[in-house]
Amino acid sequence: MKHAALMVMGAGALALAACEKAVEAPFDRGVCYAVETGAEGEPPRFNKVADNQPQIEFCAARLEEVRLRFLRMGGSRQEITGSYQGQFIFIDRGGVWISRTLDGGRFNFMARTGDGRLAMPGAIQRAIDGTPIAVSSNREPDPTAPPPL
């Protein structure tokens, strides 16, 4: 009897957790946001970082600029969270990760090169131990491409 009661209570707790409304990223076209998690029980705040960003990569670059600017001013936080058109962006020392939810699984979007720049994971050559050694590049640079970070 006790076992059944515990099972019912556990199922009830799971049902309540499932009813909790998930945080959704704004879907404003071309707008890049920095996300500040609120205190316990408060929703996160979305602070506009940049307008007219044509792709998620540009938003990630703007967020990386914000992260580095705070570190240069004496901050100690290595991670920053942002959002772009319904996707969450997570930037840390390892690279850039994206997810549809704030708490869900993350997909590796960009990785750090040996000198700290961000690049697509497939463009990075790695040594046998997994450390990055170089970034492959085009023979002729694209004049319309943004400068590397």
Image (spheres, rainbow, N blue to C red):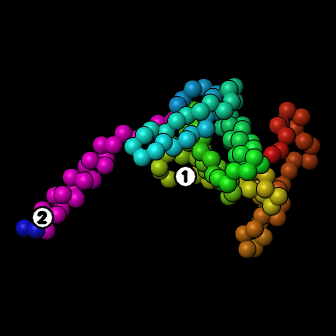
Q: Position of residue 114 (x, y in %)?
A: 80, 61
Q: Position of residue 63 (x, y in %)?
A: 68, 41
Q: Is residue 120 visible in the rendered structure shown here? A: no
Question: In the current view of this chain or complex, which residue is farthest to the bottom?
Answer: 129
The chief SS type of the magenta part is helix
Element class at badge 1: loop
Query: Residue at coordinates 69% horizontally, 25% vertically from top-left?
Result: 52
Residues under labels 1 and 2: Cα distance? 36 Å
Q: Is residue 21 left or right of residue 77?
A: left
Q: Position of residue 125 (x, y in %)?
A: 79, 62
Query: Residue at coordinates 54% horizontally, 52% vertically from top-left?
Result: 106
Q: Please tell me whether residue 72 is drawn above or below residue 59 in the rendered image.
A: below
Q: Is residue 131 left or right of residue 17?
A: right
Q: Quadrant of residue 116?
A: bottom right
Nearest to N terminus: mark 1 or mark 2: 2
How many numbered circles are shown? 2
User: Who is closer to the viewer here, 97 or 69?
Assistant: 69
Q: On the image, numbered disc 2 is attached to which residue?
A: 4
Disc 2: CA contacts within 10 A as few (<14), some (14-19) or many (>=20): few
Q: Is residue 47 visible in the rendered structure shown here? A: yes
Q: On the image, numbered disc 1 is attached to which residue?
A: 106
Query: Residue at coordinates 86% horizontally, 50% vertically from top-left?
Result: 137
Q: Amino acid at mark 2?
A: Ala
In the rendering, which numbered label is found on residue 144? Answer: none
